[in-house]
Image (tube, helix red, strand yellow):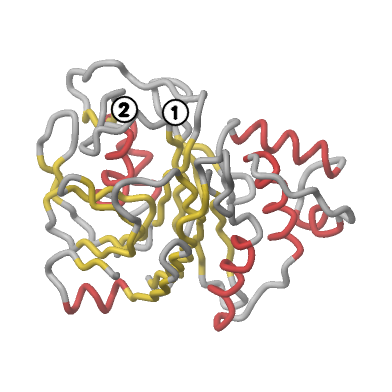
Amino acid sequence: MCTAITYQDRQDNAYFGRTMDFPLKATPWRLTYVPAGFAWQVRPSEQFLTSKYAVLGGMRLADGHYLIGDGVNEAGLACAELYFPGQVQYYETPQFYRLNLTPQDVITWLLTQHQSVAEVADNLDRLAIIAQQWYDHDIIHPFHWILSDDTGTYLIEPTNEQLSLKKAPLGILTNAPAIEQHQAKLTHLVGGEPTKERLAAFPKRLPVTRTPSNRYLRTALTLAKQPVPDHRDGILLGRKILERVQMEPLEGHDDYTHYIGVIDRTHLTYDFTDLEFEHHHRASLRHLMKKYHKPVTFH
């Protein structure tokens, strides 16, 4: 059900990675570029939101509309949506004098309208998340979001209708429960404040399960134990860590890993490993911006 990580290399380049773990949908996830100036039709208003910033990320095309799972924009702001079942509280109906969006449209707004986490924080009280279907006519999805820029990594967890940002303590995220409970379990496991030094020194190997709590604990420990890479190995480290929490298709389970994405935020490159169709792409947002003025999908 998705795992996200952030980290840096020896040269202080910043990385953002995730597994996309989700039930099979009608259209596949693809690495996709969407330029600035593109008009996104959002729900429930069906009005258009014009992109201020180009975005490169993992997306699906559903009923003629792009659905962003994660991405980075030209300002270096990265974001991913992850499942957060049993935890969310959305508005039932649109709110007056607010920007009303379905859960699927939130990441579109975050990445196409903002250049920093600080700018998101300034605008977050304008946003109302509405419990209505998106264009794919699927269920109303419970999401939380992880955002990262040069100031750090933050979360939006909509456990009540009034949204706020909070710091991601270790720069990682899985699914429910809320981040405070994940951190409490980690603190209990290692016997104290989960500092990098304490996590790196933890001697036990945890059993491997598919639960969000297990993936959070294992990812925190794995990330802390890795030597800081040089830039040439930065993306490779992200893939290595995420492969350890990759979920294989398993009978009786709807969720499995469709792709592993690792973003070099500093250089605006995206490394996309499609596990379902066995494709691999690496693309530069800066190069795409120079060459294309329409969306580009990598097949």
Q: Which residue is mark 2?
A: 129
Q: CA distance from mark 1 to mark 2?
A: 9 Å
Q: Position of residue 50 (x, y in %)?
A: 13, 49
Q: Quadrant of residue 251?
A: top right
Pick the residue in front: 46 or 146.
Answer: 46
Q: Amino acid at mark 1?
A: Pro
Q: Position of residue 2 (x, y in %)?
A: 52, 47
Q: Which residue is at 43% across, 35% downward?
A: 143
Q: Position of residue 38 (x, y in %)?
A: 13, 56
Under circle 1, the secondary element is loop
- Mark 2, other Cα within 10 Å: few <14 / some 14–19 / many ≥20: many
Q: Give the answer, above or below, for where 161 lies relative to 109.
A: above
Q: Which residue is at 48% across, 24% downward?
A: 159
Q: Position of residue 39 (x, y in %)?
A: 11, 50
Q: Amino acid at mark 2?
A: Ile
Q: Which residue is at 64% across, 32% downward?
A: 180
- Mark 1, other Cα within 10 Å: few <14 / some 14–19 / many ≥20: many
Residues at circles 1 and 2 in contact by the CB criterion of under 8 Å: yes
Q: Give the answer, above or below, for where 58 lies relative to 234.
A: above
Under circle 2, the secondary element is strand
Pick the residue in front: 79 or 98.
Answer: 79
Q: Earlier in the sequence, mark 1 or mark 2?
A: 2
The single residue placed furthest to the bottom in the displayed view is: 232
Quadrant (top left/top right/bottom left/bottom right) for the C terminus:
bottom left
Numbered tag placed on residue 158 in the rendering: 1
Q: Determine whether, in the image, residue 95 is placed left or right of residue 199.
A: left
